[in-house]
Image (cartoon, grey):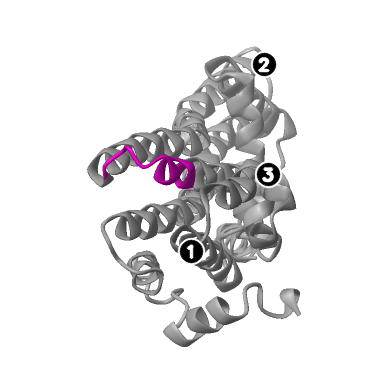
Amino acid sequence: MNIIIGFVITVGCILGGFMAMGGHINVLIQPFELMIIGGAGLGGFIMANPMKVVKDSGKALGEAFKNAVPKERNYLDVLGVLYSLMRDLRTKSRNEIEAHIDNPDESPIFQTAPTVLKNKELTAFICDYVRLIIIGNARSHEIEALMDEELNTMFSDKMKPYHAITAMGDSFPAIGIVAAVLGVIKAMGKINESPEVLGGLIGAALVGTMLGIFLSYSVCNPLTSQIKIVRTKQHRLYIIVKQTLLAYMNGSVPQVALEYGRKTISNKERPSIDSVEQEMMNPGGEKAA
């Protein structure tokens, strides 16, 4: 919603200011200039990136428009799953724990946390490191190094759409100049026409420069900024898992280990201690009822 509101304000102020200065709005309607700039930018974007990144960029844009960041329920589900697994690690046999991590879709622990189960990457991340804890041979600092390496790789992959769209946005001003030059070439082909005709052609050419700058700084930059915010917050769920499991491996009881994970959440979004305690007593909240 913020993206739409911001875009309306931006376009409204630009067009409103132009009209207030006496400009005619129909002069700015140059679909072929837009086709040149947008088409060249999109073509370069496709040439520069693997198809996987192209598809993920579309997904990232959808997440940005939906503001698909983790909510309190997502955080509570992650903490609830971790608490249940750590509790069982202390009280149950290896075979019973393996039943949960080998088939999380059928696990009562994961079924109480549908937001975790829906995120296949997060579920696999939790199961992989709980499995390493069960094996018992790895030390906590070794697990931490492995987690850091995997998290860095995951975050790098998640940021590829951000970098790809940023690069495309950076190219728009230069492509706008190309569109403007093509418009001037067209105008020069009609150099014998009246000043009114030439003025219109040159004005249309200059719209290309304006569109290139507008697409770069007023469209792509805000969108990539929002993509980075959303995906960074989504990555926070993995940091919670990391800090919680490491605290458990270093000797903290499950209740205390959860605090290590909870404290990694931004203060404005962090669930209260009471909410976390309620989640430990009633995993999944109303869903478990």
Earlier residue among tags 3 and 1: 1
Tag 3 near tag 1, CB within 8 Å: no
The residue pinned by badge 1 equals 91
State the residue at coordinates (62%, 27%): 54
Count numbered badges in the picture: 3
Residue type at mark 1?
Thr
Earlier residue among tags 1 and 2: 1
Find the distance from the CA under tag 3 to the CA under tag 1: 20 Å
Instruction: State whether residue 201 is above or below residue 279.
Output: above
Tag 1 near tag 2, CB within 8 Å: no
Range of the magenta residues?
129-139
Inspect this view and state whether residue 14 appears.
Answer: yes
Residue 103 circle label: 3
State the residue at coordinates (40%, 46%): 133
The residue pinned by badge 2 equals 190
Find the distance from the CA under tag 3 to the CA under tag 2: 72 Å
Q: Which residue is farthest top?
A: 189
Label 3 crowd bin: few (<14), some (14–19), many (20+), radius 10 Å: few
State the residue at coordinates (40%, 35%): 150
Our reading of the magenta stretch's main secondary structure is: helix
The kind of secondary structure element at disc 2 is: loop
Label 2 crowd bin: few (<14), some (14–19), many (20+), radius 10 Å: few
Q: Which residue is farthest bottom?
A: 274
Residue type at mark 2?
Lys
Earlier residue among tags 3 and 2: 3
